[in-house]
Image (cartoon, rainbow, N blue to C red):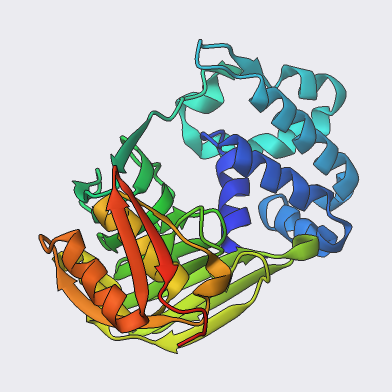
Amino acid sequence: MTIKIIDIANRFLAEQACSNQELNEFKNWLSDPSALPEVEQWLSEHWDSSAEVGSNLLIEAVFSQIKEYRLVSPSGKKFSMARVVSYYQRIAAILLIPLLGMGAWFAISQYETTVVQYSETIAPRGQKSQIVLSDGTQVWLNSDTKIRYPGQFSKNQRDVYLEGEAFFKVTKNEHQPFYVHTSGPVVKVLGTKFNVKAYLDENQVETSLFEGSVDLVINGDNGRILEKVLLPGESIVYGMHTGQLSSVKFPKDEINGWKKNQLIFKDDTFFNLVKKIERWYNVEVIYDEKKFDDRRLTVELYEGERLEKLMDIISLALSVNYQYGKGKIILTPKNSKPI
């Protein structure tokens, strides 16, 4: 039973806003036969008398609520528990138990679902950005990065959605965990400093912890959930295609050098080298991957260094010819043999 799915389940029962993705994860969990013991445990924790009704009927009622929830639109369409009451009067009473302490919500049978308003900040190629979220959390965005976040976080947790690379300094709140959603793992923290690199055109997600503690939550095959705890100074790379995790210690300057306007290559693969150049200088690099796969580079530059200087270094160190013009760089090896 994972923290993430339980948070979604509890927010759903409290009739708080859930995204379509979260509702799908919740529904898949309820319908997964291998998760039945966890589902029954969750039901029993919330409803002491749930066993009298039966897990299957309870799940069916929850599915009905999910369907009703999806019908709610920003235009203000409402839904009611009345339909569930009509067919599952006993079940409906159980479903309402968590709402008894909600005051005004319990006094009415219908309410308008609050629609969470999200903002989006983009750092284009060749630029970087910095934002402060509503809870005081500071976020630095590397080039070619997009982050989506609500104007106000929910009471139970703080969720942001990242495409690209960002450094987070999260305001500590033990009662309101902070989640960074990527195309792969979800990063959960309470209050800490960490870096997440999750570009959509790369086949891995890298999380590096500077201070505090971080949980990496990964949805595996067959509903299997993997959670990995990071230690300060540790970097974990998750392979999107392989599903494998690798852990290494990292020099801080190498991970967040971009935040200090440094362009750092430390024995970087040619693929990583090219991606960094494209994002840093807002150019397109054209080359034959098969001819450069085995070439690596270690160099450190500061922002403001001309692209031509970097290309001269690469040309000398890796025996590469380059042509630059109209926002494109064409690379060819000076000789056909690997260096």
Is 133 left, or right, of 329 in this rendering?
left
- Check the image and report above or below for 57 versus 243: above
Q: Nearer the viewer, residue 148 or 292?
A: 292
Which residue, as the protein is rendered here, is positioned at the far front?
Answer: 335
Residue 305 visible in image: yes
Q: Nearer the viewer, residue 146 or 35?
A: 146
Is 125 left, or right, of 243 in this rendering?
left
Q: In the figure, residue 61 lies in which quadrant?
A: top right
Is 135 left, or right, of 154 in this rendering?
left
Q: In the figure, residue 315 lies in which quadrant?
A: bottom left
Is 152 left, or right, of 13 in this rendering?
left
**Residue 229: percent from the left, percent from the top?**
49, 79
Q: Quadrant of the N terminus?
A: bottom right
- Residue at point 51%, 34% (across, down): 17
Which residue, as the protein is rendered here, is positioned at the far left?
Answer: 304
**Residue 221: percent from the left, percent from the top?**
76, 64
- Check the image and report above or below for 199 versus 238: above
- Residue at point 53%, 64% (across, down): 288
**Residue 274: percent from the left, percent from the top?**
39, 64
**Residue 247: percent from the left, percent from the top?**
49, 85
Q: Quadrant of the C terminus?
A: bottom left
- Check the image and report above or below for 326 versus 270: above
Q: In the figure, residue 241 lies in which quadrant?
A: bottom right
- Residue at point 19%, 50% (across, down): 130
